[in-house]
Amino acid sequence: MPSNRRKFIGQSFASLAGITATAMVPTHIFGHNLHNTSRPEEIILQPNKPSNTKESIRFSVIGLNHGHIYGMVDSLINGGGNLVAVYAKEPELLQQFTKRYPKAKIAKSENEIIDDNSIQLVASAAIPVERAPIGIRVMQSGKDFMADKPGILTLEQLKEVKKVQKETKRIYSIMYSERLGNPASVKAGELVSAGAIGKVVQTIGLGPHRMRPESRPDWFFDPKKAGGILCDIGSHQCDQFLFYTNSKQADVNFSQIGNFNNSDNPVYQDFGDMSVRSAHATGYIRIDWFTPEGLGTWGDGRTFILGTDGYIEMRKYIDIAGKEGGNHLFLVNQKETKYYDCSNIYMPYGEQLVNDVVHRTETAMTQEHCFLATELALKGQKMAHKLNV
Amino acid sequence: MPSNRRKFIGQSFASLAGITATAMVPTHIFGHNLHNTSRPEEIILQPNKPSNTKESIRFSVIGLNHGHIYGMVDSLINGGGNLVAVYAKEPELLQQFTKRYPKAKIAKSENEIIDDNSIQLVASAAIPVERAPIGIRVMQSGKDFMADKPGILTLEQLKEVKKVQKETKRIYSIMYSERLGNPASVKAGELVSAGAIGKVVQTIGLGPHRMRPESRPDWFFDPKKAGGILCDIGSHQCDQFLFYTNSKQADVNFSQIGNFNNSDNPVYQDFGDMSVRSAHATGYIRIDWFTPEGLGTWGDGRTFILGTDGYIEMRKYIDIAGKEGGNHLFLVNQKETKYYDCSNIYMPYGEQLVNDVVHRTETAMTQEHCFLATELALKGQKMAHKLNV
């Protein structure tokens, strides 16, 4: 095919993919198209408003074992929730909580909250293995439930939670905060659904975390109490895969867990990765506890969303040696490269959940999505090939 | 364990991994440690010198079907090679080549080059499926061989090439240019071997490419002539995994190939990914042909090297909405976050290969490494789950 070949010759130097040995080739051959960062438009997103007609609910808290509870409570309060009471076994955790929320009544027992019929929702960041049993008791008492992630620790717990949820028609919501509580992630969802990058074919989620073992309670190091690495921080990533690819069913292709640098604790997992797939998209997830001390924050979390007509990268918490702060979103599509500073935008999860409690809707997250994200993480954890674990 | 728990409470807000809902939580709770990009040291690396005692070889070229040949030839010339002759079937490709290298003699046939006993090495960027057969004839004539990637197209070709290489003791080198021809990749190798990030436990290689179908010859779209996506551009990534993890053996855990946006050409693959593993490290590789027109170069190639004490990210060809140019290397370890501009550094591959030809050594790349990288890519290609292909 001579005509094709002629075109091939003419364009091969400027555009041919794979010519990477630029330092070996005079620059004029490539023109300025290679290794060129144009100055793209930078957009600082302005705060968008929550809706004016905010609903209101009464909620309480059971279990304060992870600091995530503060983000969860604030999200509910911002969304219209009134915090009524709190129960926790640990006096020191209670003290810290009531210092921040002085109006919260300290309940004497879990049952005091469960038995209070004026309460519409219970939020919990108990030790992970206790969350599903608490959620089941909460749903059976006629209330909705909001769990920190991992919201469910085993496939057996998942089965039981699904059964009770179906019977009681209560909400069992898991706060996958790396999406629901991150402004860049919220903006990415808007861009994807507006078609900014065409058809989404893949997500990559990198979720590195800093460990600081001295800051962690005992249960953190016991997979039976905290879940393995894929069950725990992997569940965030499964949520993001399902959300950005708009997948309603999916399965795990492959997974592995590793213990590369914690041989003193042989059951601990400091590395995990997995591949997931739906009918129309795939996802890769990598999680680790290796964030080094020289990073200015707890983890260089990244999300890449690949579409047929472009891609999005989120540098969620830091842009190493780049832009200040967090909440960075980069969009590249057929038209341009664009940067969005998402720091100011409103995250609707709390308000949506409060609304769902009042109106029995599924706007914050469908129940199906909530459970499927966890199911993927649990399956990945269960089938994982073990590297030195 | 009360003492642990006390520490947990005290430090949980500043350092606890997973508190991502920052916008929900007052900033003073986190302090300035979250979402903070310190201004890290920026290092512009100065050109390092090739060695003074350069060896010299006579080399020729057979096959000009991919523009990579220019990077290959320049690399050899910079390393001390004297270009003698060239053979190609296509007059238009020859014309372009001799315009750039006017001293190269045009050979009338492949045999004219094969039979010239003064030639020590032959370089080839023939149509991929022809490279192994050419390489075999070259080695059998007593010469060394340097192939563009993919250097070998099937496991059968690999078996034959390995056999002849063993018999003849000639060099069969494949120019994995995304490492050997990229300054940031060379610098990363130095940092890793100096222990800058501890023990390397994983690599992630993202190799997006722009297609521009009109610029591609017919063979490009035929996997039987060009190899599938994992065999072709995946082989670069397998090379990088083996190199940065210092793995001498490895296997493929999982692979898949996809055709998401080229349904008019049902055998073509525009997406592929795979997971590889050695005894002490793992690797994830993703390849695609979706680079959108709004990117300032042909592909936003990235490499992440994860170690127990830090990580490296290479933004090889562009830093979207960030620093100008290419060849960016970011290092984060227990001490600091550092940025290296690697644009000026010397890439030793050509010189090392010329030396290897003269001294019968393996400094540019061991033969074993060269074949294993290709074997991983070929296995990944062969066992790949098919998504719409």
Image: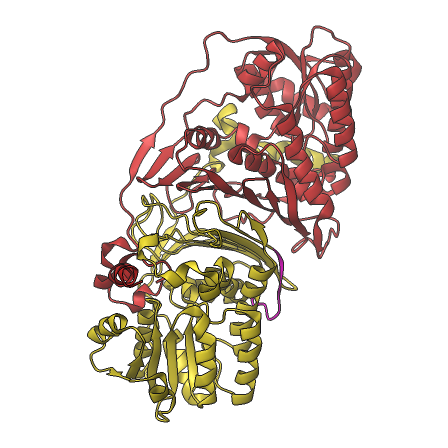
Chain colours: A yellow, B red
Task: Give the residue at x 47% y 30%.
Answer: B189
State the residue lying farthest toward the front.
Answer: B1
Asked where in the image residue B99 lies, by quadrant, the reply is top right
Task: Give the residue at x 51% y 29%.
Answer: A22
Residue A315 is covered by the magenta coloring: no
Asked where in the image residue B228 lies, by quadrant, the reply is top right
Q: Is residue A178 above or below residue A349?
A: above
Say which quadrant the N terminus of chain A sits in: top right
- Tell me which segment is drawn in magenta: A246-254
Task: Give the residue at x 52% y 89%.
Answer: A168
Residue B93 pos. (x, y %): 68, 25
Residue B337 pos. (x, y %): 33, 41
- How many numbered markers are drawn? 0
Of residues B316 and A95, which is closer to you in this image?
A95
Q: In this rendering, does residue A128 appear at all?
A: yes
Of residues B265 and B53, which is closer to you in this image?
B53
Task: Give the residue at x 39% y 21%.
Answer: B47
Left or right of A201 in this view: A296? left
Left or right of A330 in this view: A275? right
Residue A227 pos. (x, y %): 48, 63
Q: Is residue A81 above or below residue B139?
A: below
Of residues B314 and A67, which is closer to you in this image?
A67
Q: Is residue A339 above or below residue A170?
A: above
Q: Is residue A86 above or below residue A249?
A: below
Residue A247 is covered by the magenta coloring: yes
